[in-house]
Each structure stands twice: as C-alpha cells, then as structure tokens.
C-alpha cells in the first residue's frame, strides 16, 4: 500500500477488522501488507491490508516515550518489496503469533504455504490449517524464542501427516469423516464429525447429533480433534 508513504516513520493509529486498535510506528508497507512497530512491547505487527479499516497519524502526547524502531526488521530484507505471501515464506520455521479470530492468538510455526491457506504447527493444537483470507496479523518472536519457554528438544515441528491439497476447500475435503475443530471450537456447533466438504460448504455432525452446515468462506481455522 504505497499510498502510505507519507506516513512512513510516523506514529499512526490503525483500526483492524473486528474492532481492534493498535498504535505504533509505520516502518514498511507493500502491495497487500503493512508493518507496524509497537515500541511498548518491542513487537513488529505484519498486518494484511484487506483487514485495515482505518489509518491516521496519531499526535504525540507531551512527555510520552518515543521508541526507536530497530534498524532491521525480523522477516524481511532491505532489498525486498514486501507482500503477505513473501512474509509468510520468510516466517517458515520461526516461532510466531498468528491472530485470526476470537480472543486468543495461535502460537507456533508455519510449516507449509499453499495457494490460499497455510499449515501451522502449534504445541497446543498440533497441526492447524489456517485460511490466509482471515489472518488479521502476524507477530514474529525473537529468533531464539520458543513457545511457552519450552526446551526446543520438546518442540519437534511435526509436518502434517495428512496429504496437503493446493486449496483450503480441497484440504477440508481430505478431512471428511474425521472429528474436527473449527475456529478453535468457540462454539459447540464448531466441533464435530465432518461428513462432507463440497461446494464451499461443510456438513458437520455435532456431539448432540445435530447436522450443521457451515459456509467455508467464513471458516478461519480447522484442525483434527483427535
């Protein structure tokens, strides 16, 4: 989003889909992503442009602390024009936080990047399939950091044992007849047996043996429940 060049290096306030607000320094922008440095936490937020609702320069308050951004950004080089897909590629194998939905983020490692989704290994949820269309932001942790301060020897980044499809809807079809959890299971109707995945519609049988149909366009994450 090169139209933000006049805001480069300035303090900005950004509103992200879902009613989330962040303030920080705009340190980079590309065709479909921006990079915000939040000095209070020392974090770089990689935010896909599709979820940006509003950006404005924020006024510096008197006596407020100014945080100088590091000269090097964690997932890019000076020679690269950044894009969402390139950032995902650069993040492979590194401990990151990905936020997609609800009140919690997912922590772990990107292992594979497909056409419209990526495969994510979480020590808690194991293999998670995440739709690119719903990623609100990605935050890389320091290079040697590990999830929950676990010893790295207890963190094998296990690749998905399920054969990977090129698209998110095709991958869901490979999960048919298995117990799945959708969007972190924030509702009992998002946990159940996936009977069918066809025409961008999922047919799920819940624990109460109810049949629920879900529009795949609104499914953010899916992983096996066993």
Image (cartoon, rainbow, N blue to C red):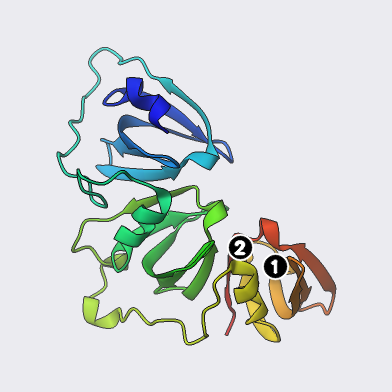
Marks 1 and 2, how far apart at CA:
7 Å
N-terminal label among 1 and 2: 2
Going 71% across and 77% down the picture, which residue do you hit? 192
Q: Residues within 10 Å of mark 2 (few under 14, many from 20)?
A: some
Q: Residues within 10 Å of mark 1 (few under 14, many from 20)?
A: many
Q: Quadrant of residue 112?
A: bottom left
Q: Quadrant of residue 165?
A: bottom right
Q: Nearer the viewer, residue 206 or 201?
A: 201
Residue 183 marker? 2
Q: Disc 2 on helix, strand or loop?
A: helix
Going 41% across and 55% down the picture, which residue do you hit? 85
The quarter in which the C terminus is drawn is bottom right
- Relative to 148, is 31 on the left or the right? right
Query: Mark 1 near mark 2, Cβ–Cβ under 8 Å?
Result: yes
Residue 16 marker? none
Q: Quadrant of residue 24?
A: top left
- Relative to 219, is 84 on the left or the right? left
Name the residue that disc number 1 marks.
Answer: 190
Q: Nearer the viewer, residue 36 or 199?
A: 199
């Amino acid at each position: 989003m090169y139209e933000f060049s006049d805001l480069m290096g300035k303090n900005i306030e950004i509103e992200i889909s879902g009613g989330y607000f962040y303030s920080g320094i705009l340190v980079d922008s590309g065709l479909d992503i921006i990079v915000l440095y939040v000095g209070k936490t020392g974090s770089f937020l990689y935010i896909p442009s599709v979820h940006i609702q509003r950006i404005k320069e924020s006024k510096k308050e008197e006596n407020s602390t100014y945080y100088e951004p590091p000269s090097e950004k964690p997932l890019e080089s000076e020679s690269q024009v950044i894009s969402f897909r390139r950032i995902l590629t650069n993040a492979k194998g590194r401990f990151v936080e990905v936020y997609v939905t609800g009140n919690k983020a997912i922590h772990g490692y990107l292992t594979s990047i497909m056409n419209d989704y990526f495969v994510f290994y979480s020590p808690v949820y194991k293999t998670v399939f995440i739709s690119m269309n719903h990623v609100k932001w990605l935050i890389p942790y320091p290079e040697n950091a590990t999830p929950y301060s676990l010893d790295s020897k207890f963190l094998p980044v296990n690749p998905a044992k399920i054969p990977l499809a090129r698209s998110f809807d095709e991958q869901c079809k490979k999960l048919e007849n298995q117990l799945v959890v959708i969007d972190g299971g924030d509702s009992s109707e998002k946990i159940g047996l996936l009977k069918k995945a066809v025409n961008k519609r999922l047919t799920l049988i819940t624990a109460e043996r109810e049949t629920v149909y879900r529009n795949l366009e609104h499914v953010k994450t899916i992983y096996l429940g066993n």
